[in-house]
Amino acid sequence: MLMHNIALSLQKLILYGVPEEQLQGHQEGLVRYMEEHKEQIPDIVKHILSAGTDFSEARKASKKDANSSSNGDVYSESLSWLQWLMFKNEPGAMLDDLERSNAGERAVCGSVWGHNDVAYRCRTCESDPTCAICVPCFQNGNHKDHDYSIMYTGGGCCDCGDATAWKREGFCSRHKGAEQIKPLPEELARSVGPILDALLQFWKEALCLLQPPPAKGGDSSSCKRIAEELTTSISSMLLEFCTRSENLLSFLSLRIREFPDMLDALIRSDRFLDKKVARKLHEFLLKLISDPAFKYEFAKVFIRYYPITFEEVIKGCNDSLLEDYPLMTTFSVQIFTVPTLTPRLVREVDLLGVLLGCLTDLFLSCIGEDGRLQVCFCFCFLCLKEFNAHVDQLLVCWHIL
């Protein structure tokens, strides 16, 4: 499979106009070619990624791995080529260098949790009851005589180093706050930026082709399969970048939040993705929201889609539909409870109005022809669950204000 994908990449580049002798050195040869043809970056990136798409289509047509979905491996070789263009060197070595340069200097922890991972709450240090830190950060901090407790997580990320969620005196010895993050070296930013922009454009276009799932028993569309494979691969690669280098994390968060309509595409497409793919995307986004500027831009788009999503769940009249909107439950607690963020969202994007509007729609949906609330399946399950969630969010907003 790997050799076939490499051959497709080389063939596409040669047909585009890259000299064949230049590609005899594979990635190193393409790096040299791009040094003299920077204006071709968007086209080169598109051709490299489309080789992964062609490989996916060919594999599907030959019925190989027909029962597997969203394994993401069809784009691994394409993304390897792009990493060479980003770093102008062997990617693993460059990431190792960046990781060593960040050793012991990470400003924010941001460790992402799964379900039932162990974490610590500290009522003395937290900004609100949703905040928590990981075990290593607790052990490396000073919480003597604090009001703390152990908890099992349902997802989310460690708040150590995030001044919007945790008091500075509660930071551990390894994390000192987002303002301490150093910018990516200028030369590296110049090489990574254009490749990343072209990659984001290709990804966004694939996500924008996603449509609601077909009727039960129907086949998943080719667009869905390609978008899921691409999302899995790109999320995994960028998540590794964020984990290895805080400089890269900061650079990625800036580039993604400023890329036109990228956040819209990521949030809109979430409900159309396979749950396993969505979890990988959420893991990446949870890393990025450790950057306060990214969290704010993400929150604005999230709030814009919140009532649309909520309306769909109400129409379905079944609380199991909430499982189809994992972004809603995963990120609302990351946004609506932040004391430094919530007042700004109330002022600038009418957060309270949005939440009250959703709550109004919820009750209106349960009014019968006689004008009374109907005690039915919808009310007992969906309303109680969402009512409690909204009241919690509204109370937090009022408390913060």
Image: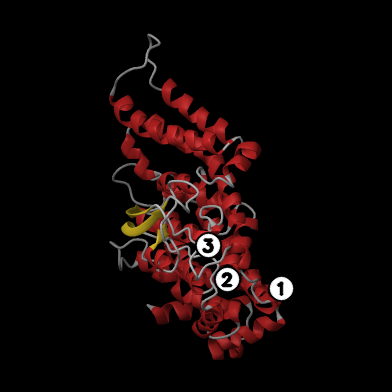
Pointer 2: what residue?
Answer: 248
Relative height, residue 283 to residue 1 (above, below) = above
Determine the image quadrant of residue 118: bottom left
The spot of residue 68 in percent (x, y) is: 30, 63
Q: Say whether disc 1 or disc 2 marks the residue closer to the N-terminus.
A: 1
Q: Residues within 10 Å of mark 2 (few under 14, many from 20)?
A: many
Closer to the eye: label 2 or 3: 3
Q: Is residue 220 left or right of residue 101?
A: left
Q: Amino acid at mark 2?
A: Leu
Q: Amino acid at mark 1?
A: Glu
Give me the residue at 52% from left, 65% from top.
108
Above-or-below relation of 387 to 168: above
Q: Secondary structure at mark 3?
A: loop
Q: Position of residue 163 (x, y in %)?
A: 56, 56
Mark 2 to mark 3: distance in Å? Answer: 17 Å
**Which of 233 and 241 lies nearest the eye of the viewer?**
241
According to the picture, the residue beneath numbered tag 3 turns out to be 161
Extreme-front residue of the structure? 145
Would you say residue 198 is visible in this rendering? Answer: no
Q: Is residue 327 visible?
A: yes
Q: Which residue is mark 1?
A: 39
Q: Is residue 371 left or right of residue 51?
A: left
Foreground label between 1 and 3: 3
Image quadrant containing the N terminus: bottom left
Mark 3: which amino acid? Gly
